Amino acid sequence: MSTSPSMLTKFESKSSRAKGIAFHPKRPWILVSLHSSTIQLWDYRMGTLIDRFEEHDGPVRGIDFHKTQPLFVSGGDDYKIKVWSYQTRRCLFTLNGHLDYVRTVFFHHELPWILSSSDDQTIRIWNWQNRSLICTMTGHNHYTMCAQFHPKEDLIVSASLDQSVRVWDISGLRKKHSAPTSMSFEDQVARANSNQADMFGNTDAVVKFVLEGHDRGVNWVAFHPTLPLIVSAGDDRLIKLWRMSETKAWEVDTCRGHFQNASACLFHPHQDLILSVGEDKTVRVWDLNKRTSVQSFKRENDRFWVIAAHPEVNLFAAGHDNGVMVFKLERERPASAVYQNQLFYVTKDKHVRSYDFSSHVESPSLLSLRKFGNTWVPPRTLSYNPAERAILVTSPTDNGIYELVGLPKDATGVSDPTDIKRGQGNSAVFVARNRFAVFTQSTQLVEIKDLSNSTTKSFKAPGGTNDIYFGGTGCLLLISPTAVVLYDIQQKKQLADITVAGVKYVSWSNDGLHAALLSKHNVTIVTKSLELVSTLHETIRIKSATWDDTGVLLYSTLNHIKYTLLNGDNGIVRTLDQTVYLVRVKARNVYSLDRAAKPKVLTIDPTEYRFKLALIRRNYDEMLQIIKTSSLVGQSIISYLQKKGYPEIALQFVQDPQTRFELAIECGNLEVATQMANQLDRPKIWTRLGAEALSHGNHQTVEMTYQKLRNLDKLSFLYLCTGNEEKLTRMAKIAEHRGDSTSRFQNALYLGSVENRIQMFRELDLYPLAYLTARSHGLTEECESLLEATGLSEDQVSLPTLGSPATTPATIVPTYKENWPMKPAPHSSFEKALAGEVGDAIEDPTTDLLDEGVPPADDPSVKAGLGDEEEDAGEGWDMGDDIALDAAGADSDFVKVDNPDDAAPSGSGSSEADIWSRNSPLAADHVAAGSLESAMQLLNRQVGAVNFAPLKPRFMEIYTASKTFLSASTGLPPLFNYVRRTVEETDARKVLPMIPRDLETIAANDLQEGYTAMRMNRLADGVTTFKVILHSLLVNIVGSPSQVEEARSIISKAVEYTLAMSVELARREMASATDAEQTLKRQLELNAYFTIPKLEVAHRQLALTAAMKQAFSKKQFSSSLSFANRIIANGTPAKLVENATKVKTQSERAGSTDKLDIEFDPFAEFDVCAASYTPIYGGSPSVACPFDGAKYHDRYKGQICRICDVCEIGAAASGLRLWVRGL
């Protein structure tokens, strides 16, 4: 038994004793009938109880699902058979007739029949459609414990405590009760005279065979699904196998091993195995052909009573004293490995095959592994070595074994391997072209072996390690139940670790920069140095994962393919009919292996996750393309865009007027908001539009909303503010026509019309007010007229002291013809792309890749393949739309001051600058305050900054942008003011300055400008741009920890691009020198190092293409082959892949050797020294810049960093601070 693996338990429930079990044929449901009279319906995939059914009185022993209808049947100790609907969740009817306990109930696979066995010694068949008893079979003389239909033929098998097994023929019953069909004359006569036949003893169900061989009562019996075999289990502790023919039946063999009563048994639906359970608390598996025990599983305290098999899926369930368990006998995950465009995998019959992703062709068997491990145990893992075309397979047999086998060049059909290297070990994986690691869990020892299976070195794994995975060249990932450790094999030391529970599988991204750690319900994405990137949780078990070329992780659960981005955003790609294991994603195809180890190609729609990825990378051109060409709609994508702060993009997806209005208001698009308001035409909508338009200074829209709302008072005041006297006069007439005295007075006041006011007071008989108004404005004649009308004299009127009348201020400049001038909000890059402003920045995808005057290859066929690229004098290298370029030149949001030193701030302004430097420990705030000395001290402590000359432009930019100067009277100094980023803050201790060129601006503009320089082959400009990015981030502030991480990411990118461009510029300078031939070896080395920095995939392809062409032209065929393979592995664009394929063919034909031996190992992982442009291998002494992390040889310690030009290499520093909590 030691060679057998343990069972894989998928679900367990806790309850009283389980007496009956039934799987649903399609859904992940299982019915469990309990000794406590309850029937439970479980979802074993989710582990949740769906429902309970409790109408039986006493234990329920039999249960079964109908194959097609939403029904199930139960039978219990109350002598009743009940038919239930799981849709309505109630009992439909009860079948009465049995006189004792009902032991089992089963539906017929075709006919509307139910078969029941009972302690009343009868077997009965019921028609559940007309709810009648159609047959009672007698013959057993003790309790009938079990009766089942044959899956295909008109047979029934029954077991009884009378120690016999009986096989019954029910073909007569089928003919009697089936629907009328075309029958022969004899069948028609037999059917017409069926009652007469019954009188002569020809019953509908007759005993065909009586099988006797058990010494005690028989508890269970079952048919084989396809063969003429029967298996039975009895109280004599034996499992007996029987065979039958048309005329007789006989005992074949007996399986001995149970040491208590055997409760139940069955045949494996798909393999030559028998499963049995017993009161000895064991589940046993037997080889059907050898009748020997293959596997056993024992519980501590629970006797088993029943076992059931899923009709389609490889699942079994066993009921015991305390519930039920659902389990598998073996892992169904096929062992596989992917290399470039090929998948290598092991089939169910243990043959190694390959599958080509490009041609979708499955190869014949490469070799057979049928002698590897146990017959019933498939290989666990497969690791592929392309250099030696060898595979490393492992199996859990015999406490773990491995085999190293070479694959034949051609697939010639089934063949046994000849040269085999074997050994003991639980896990084995290749770690280099000629080394593999073997881990033995019992000793916690990791051995590094060469291809001759000899141990070259070994080390002890950390305690609790249970598996190993490839961790990058020369490294291993050591998996324990609670953590993952990155271990350097060469240095024999732990490089990093991360706490993650229950990791089962590891999936590396195509560029090797990220890895997905898969556990049962969690996905953890980490960098190659085990830094946490994101995590997600799934309620359904996670089965596999693979990476898209764009850096998106696709993973499969039991019933879905889902995706997750590096920032944690995730969603569903498609549903699955059956569980698959993902191996590769290419464009719209997902390549996978199903549980039968067959390759499957699934079509997906990657639009949603590509759109989100483009959004995160700010690739607005790609987003615009997706919006124009796809039907990506739905509330989820709209809410996602709103949550991420992109309402202007969400607006492009929405058709619903209300939603479009809300989004348009949010992003300030008054044109769309007005269109939607016209469609909706509701007062609340017009009110919101008016408020938003007023904040934008769009008084024409405000006027329209006030007119729609008939808000006449506000409309009059608007006309006053804009100087529109004509419409103000019209408003006065409207007020007079409406008889609205208050509005009429208000408009007269706005117009400055004293006569209208006096006339209105007269009409209202308010003569005192009319007289007072006329007298105060010096209208003598009007005063006399009023006195005459009231019959009073001037002496009789008492007046207060009157001053000069106030006049309505006149509008200096009427603005009603145009909206108020305001600085328009800067358009987002996406809105610019939408308006076609960045169209000119997208290069023609047919332009030349690069033009450096590389001499053509000698081979004519290669000249033909590469000639097109080398003939054109292209301006740069082109990768199409891969990297978006935002429109440059947008107006700055900050005030520019030409001579800030001319205006010496004084008073409160000076004190606020002092407050800034006191309030913040960030260097940028000290620069804004003018405290440059303290800012330099901070930078020196944090990042070892010593050379501040390159930072002068940045210092001046921050200092000037945080202040404004407003011209005052002639001859007086300008008014001085400070620009704060904490605008709403009233506490002086929290007042801080505005810092220009924030992180978003750098990412959206400067970084894209650097990418464009790379794409257009303007490398010198690119170096300048990326250094400006480094200086801008060195003296800056961010608003959250997540932005700190984003800033670090941009710094890392800037370093990689600066280094790559500098290396290539150095090579070009050598190539153009007079002694170029003497430095050819060095040129070729720099050419190779150009491909080492971690650039974006699109730009890495450019570097690889340049290196490949240069190497090929100098007859460095091994190097050119290596570069070509990397281009092909990256996969895009097609033009580069096609060229690389041609170079690869010619390099292989030329012998794959280099003319010059250069210092470059394509299989080793190393850093490039940023000063000498030479490799720094693992274990070599090195130092780094404390700011940007650029690596240098130890001899450069103390010099100034060549990347940032500011910091001292190897200086002790506390680390750059860009954010402080609370500021």
Image (cartoon, rainbow, N blue to C red):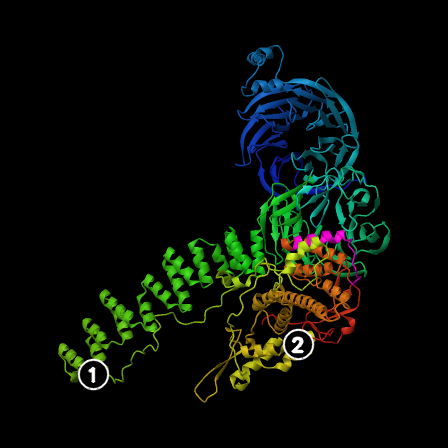
Nearer-the-camera pick, 905 or 73: 905
Residue 844 lies in quadrant:
bottom right
Q: Position of residue 46 (x, y in %)?
A: 62, 44
Q: Amino acid at mark 2?
A: Leu
Question: What's drawn in magenta, residue-wise?
Answer: 1136-1159
Answer whether residue 1146 is magenta in the image. yes
Find numbered disc 1 in the image and state the secondary structure of the residue it sits on: loop
Q: Amino acid at mark 1?
A: Ser
Q: Position of residue 800 (x, y in %)?
A: 24, 83
Q: Which mark is residue 798?
A: 1
Nearer-the-camera pick, 905 or 210: 905
Residue 938 lies in quadrant:
bottom right
Find numbered disc 2 in the image and state the secondary structure of the residue it sits on: helix
Q: Residue at x 29, y 74 (%)?
A: 750
Q: Which mark is residue 349?
A: none
Counting residues from the N terminus, which is met first, the one under dot 2 or under dot 1? 1
Left or right: where 770 falls relative to 202: left
Q: Residue at x 73, y 25 (%)?
A: 217
Left or right: where 416 falls relative to 516: right
Q: Position of residue 1164 (x, y in %)?
A: 77, 59
Vertical order, 323 against 791 (above or below): above
Q: Position of residue 296 (x, y in %)?
A: 77, 37
Q: Which residue is mark 2?
A: 939
Residue 493 lies in quadrant:
bottom right
Q: How many marks?
A: 2
Crowd rating for badge 1 (residues with CA inside 10 Å; few <14, some 14–19, many 20+): few
Distance Cα–Cα, label 2 vs label 1: 79 Å
